[in-house]
Amino acid sequence: MLALLSLALALPAHAGDTWYTPGPGLRYLYRTSSGMQIHAVYVDLCEPGIAIRATTSGERRQSVPSFASDVGAVAAINGDFFSYADYSTSGLSVGNGAAWSDTADDSSSAIVAFGEGRADVIRQGVTVSTSTWIEDAVSGHPGLLESGVDTSSVWDERHPRSAAGITEDGETLILVVVDGRSSSSVGATVAELRDLMRDLGAWDATNLDGGGSSTLWLDAYGTVNNPSDGTPRTVANHLGVVYDPTDWPEGKHCGDLDGDGWTTNEGDCDDEDAAIHPGAFELCNAIDDNCEDGTDEGYDTDADGYRTCDGDCADTDASRHPGAVETEDDVDEDCDFVVDDGTPGHDDDGDGWTERAGDCDDADTLRFPAAPERADGRDEDCDGLVDEGTEAYDDDGDGVSERAGDCDDTAATMFPGAGELPNGRDDDCDGRADEGTVLVDDDGDGWTEVAGDCDDAARLVFPGTFELEDGRDDDCNALVDDRTPAFDDDGDGWIEHDGDCDDTAPDVFPGAPEVADARDEDCNGLADDTTDVYDDDHDGWTERDGDCDDAAPGRFPGAIEVADGADDDCDGIIDQGTRAFDDDQDGWTEDAGDCHDGDPAVYPGAVEIVDARDQDCDTLSDDETEAWDDDRDGWTEREGDCDDGDAHTFPGAREAIDGHDGDCDGVAEVPEGWFGCSTAPGAGVGWAPVWGLSGLLTLARRRRPRGSAGR
């Protein structure tokens, strides 16, 4: 409590400050400043009986007063931002030693954490797991202060705000709520909250969930602020202060746990090990014994990454340490107490020879110049040859040693697998001489290759034997299967097996051209087929006999000609005597419309003449001639019709006064108003009109239409 009083006296004085003491280890400050109502609770973490308790996963979704009542807290504040869906928090939440399974730290939040002998605000941007020392924690963002330095200025709007901070000595926790959204308190921006926390004495601090969630509760007074919702909101997690002097006689987060005279807040970096504290002697043990400057300072003077307790034999020379590359310089660089080991000047295997002196394997005591060579696949004497002088060495250079089966290692042509030669020696080292050569009867048929055996591996093949149909030259006459059905005796490319029906005649074979010689050249079972002496269509006539189409049985000399576009009777004329033939050679057949195919002057489109016949085959005789009455007025031109295109003009017709010779008497009646003769070329005799009223009246009295008068 004295610590809180000292802190209160050290804070800058404000005219609107009012202090209260709601219980042991607690001081409550109520301040009005610049339109803000500020509520701050100072918690003396070194007060006997004081401990911090955060919400467990099972205690989530309560108001601050409800949580405080459940855990028996004397003070409490709301915690982290959260989701209304499942009341999970934005950052890491730990309560009563257990982290919430649905939360984790992703470095986006600052964490207010508490454990035995320790309280800390872990800054934003550092990811932590549930460290063994953290028993209770809430998260928030953004961070406000880190070692007294500003870390945030975001969120310019004024709203109700909540915050938590810890003093520089680590012995006091500060819980703050600024009321807002009311006429009596406008709230604070994040920057104003940050400056307020510094003014209230915080060294490290973070923003917590604000707005309607901001709630500060004291057991002595209840909810001390004015929540903007009107009543304390149900939130996800909380931070509570409990008081029990029987459990924590020195204060849970402020004691010297290991009894070494140093607390965590005083700099003890491991308050569970009395040998570790500020001022302790630093040992070479990978532990920061004196809680300063990292681990094992002073034990790696040359900064080569190796400590003297790790085997660095020269801690003032960074080039010498365990694992360094040894050089040939009479210095032990790798600190293995051997000088120049692994270099050409050191006898590594102790055989009295170094690599520089010619040792070809300084890791093997049996290998050095002048060592005895052994048959082991290695160069013992370091002369560049392996196993020379032993049975494992190939003396004659044929690729095979005596150990591998060379029966004469002085002859490069004798070794297993060598080609046997007819020389009376066992060249292939199989225990037999000349086998497989022309001097030996390999197949036991009584004939050698020298004697004429053409296949000395086949017992049935030798000169004079019977030739078989087996694709081999059995009798060694250089012919395969001769005198068998599988041999082409006549050399025409066909054998009897493939269909040659006469293998003595080279012009007889399947597909050969057939000739008229009473033989079956193409071996199809028919003699002379496809020649001019063979009746291919079986109509009784051959081409030689005059059949003009021996593939059509209906075409031969004397056959009946039909209109089919072919020469059926083979007389060289197609379709003669049928309606499809132009008998009179006028270019028209009866099928095409010729009405008299015996008269070349009669056909469709011929010129009609006066002969009482139908020349143009339109069923009319003499039409379009002077003997034909074209206008059907009963008069032809030959009978005097002077206009056979006008049925009203003919001899004896009634004359009309229209300038036209209607009765063919050579005189035309002229109406009044007409005068003169037309002498225009081709006009004939006529009258030219003089336009006037009398002329128009005359034209109106036209003669009756053609066809209305008869003879």
Image (cartoon, helix red, strand yellow):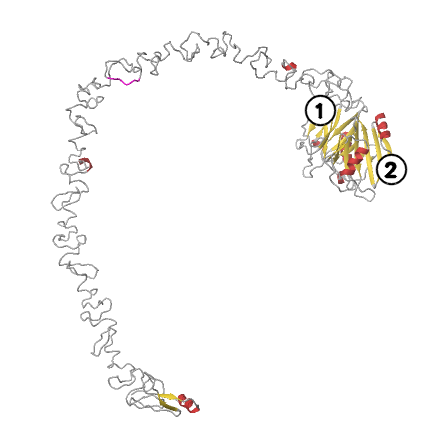
The residue type indicated by label 2 comes to Gly
Corner quadrant of residue 320? top right
The residue type indicated by label 1 comes to Trp
Q: CA distance from mark 2 to mark 1?
A: 40 Å
Which secondary structure class fits the magenta region best?
loop
The x, y position of residue 595, in whole percent, is: 22, 71
Label annotation for residue 133: 1
Observer-nearest residue: 93 or 671?
671
User: What residue is drawn where x is 59% and y is 10%?
Assistant: 337
Magenta region, residue range: 417-421
Q: Residue at the right extreme?
A: 15
The x, y position of residue 627, in whole percent, is: 24, 81
Quarter containing the C terminus: bottom left
**Residue 118 horizontal side relative to residue 694, left or right:** right
Corner quadrant of residue 50? top right
Res 218 seen here: no
The x, y position of residue 566, in whole percent, is: 20, 59
Res 430 seen here: yes
Residue behind mark 2? 16
Rendered view: 43 above or below 652: above
